[in-house]
Image: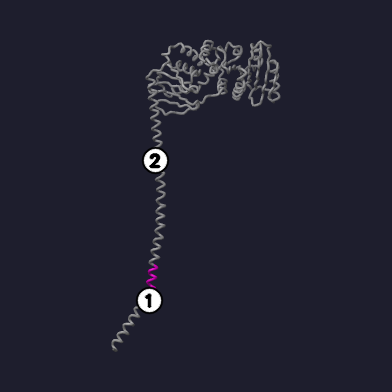
Amino acid sequence: MIIDLTGTTSSEIASALLRARRNAGSPAMGMVGTVVVVVDEASHHDAMKAANEAGREHPSRVLVAILRPGRGTGGLDAEVRVGEGIPGEAVLLRLHGELAKVPESVITPLLLPDSPVIVWWPGGGPAVPNEDPLGALGRRRVTDAAAGRRGAVDFTARAEGYAPGDTDFAWSRLTPWRALMAAALDQYPTKVSGAEVVSAKGNASADLMAAWLQCRLGVPVEQRVSRGPGITAVRMFTPAGPISLTRPDGSVATFSIPGQPDRPVALKRRNTSELLSEELRRLDPDDVYAQTLACMVKREKMPDSAKIVSEADRRSVQSAAEKAASRTASVAGKAASSALEAKAAGAGRKSAAKKPAAKKATAKKAVPAKTSAAAKSARKAGAAKQAAPAKKAAAKKTTAKTGTSKRVAGRS
């Protein structure tokens, strides 16, 4: 259900929400909080879509505030959405003129009572979120440094004006990276002499990752530039070789630990709704983020020499890469030889199967030969039997002729 309200007030919007719930047959509110989205006209559609998708896990009332400050008379236009595939409630607010300068006067009456408030700035956010009029209403204040052009400067200002509840999507994107690197040191406890973060140029998450590693390990952390997307590799250098997490395609990463086989890890780049869902799961202050911001300020004041990895660590990376390549080649060779062995075994089985068949064919050929020989002998025997009477008759005739000639000779 969509209700359009032009030139309205907060009380009329609240009444429209109540009527919409009753018409939908669910007068009770099953929502866990209020998400206030401060956005401009160009990107409000994507922001509302992400908030509604996150609401499938955390049903909430989503208040999207589009601020249009100006010199004209203040006004408020609203669009109320209940149902239509929306798990909670969504209200699109357009504040004009002088009213846009005091948005808290419109948002406050629409907040759900006795429930947490999350304020989100998809377009970057103010330098100090806690000092913003709408940010002061929130229990959590979510910004996105990746949406701004100068993320490092924003982080410096936010570190100085940090308040419990502040967080950033650039930090949320690092959750799986930090978990894997911490798990690597749990599986392979060793001394780390340096670290490296490789990412696309100007990546705010890479800056936070480098600051977090340097804060936790107390070693120099070097940042290098790649083609992206996002962070492409994180390495920790140890005496036995680097512990690395490499993701060149933004989808699947390779997790490498010295002395162990490489493992593929699903590490895709998460969308906005997934990041927002993570922030809605945890509403308590993020102390690690606050410490990382403080470390980031200290890191910016360090000389460049303190952020460079030694040549010995570089050589360990190269030797580890060569060993990995040799392992890959040996595995490929074994696979090829096993394939050849299997092929040879298959050929042997085929030849073994052909031999009995050949014997059978030979036997079949031999039987007719024997049969033909017997037939010939039988024919010869028959011919001999037939020729015997003729021979006897010829012999009788010869005897008779001889006797006649003797008698004739005696008479003469």
Question: Which residue has dot 2 on it?
Answer: 341
Question: Which residue has dot 1 on it?
Answer: 390
Residue 71 forms part of the magenta stretch: no
- The one of 261 and 310 positioned closer to us in this rendering: 310
Snapshot quadrant of residue 400: bottom left
The magenta span reads: 378-387
Residue 381 forms part of the magenta stretch: yes
Q: Image height check: is 198 above or below 351?
A: above
Q: State which quarter of the image contains the C terminus.
A: bottom left
Q: Secondary structure at mark 1?
A: helix
Badge 2 amino acid: Glu
What secondary structure is the stretch in magenta mostly built from? helix
Question: Residue 392 at x, y = what percent?
Answer: 36, 77
Q: Residue at x 40, y 37 (%)?
A: 336
Question: Residue 318 at x, y = what percent?
Answer: 39, 24
Q: Is residue 148 found left or right of 241 in the rendered image?
A: right
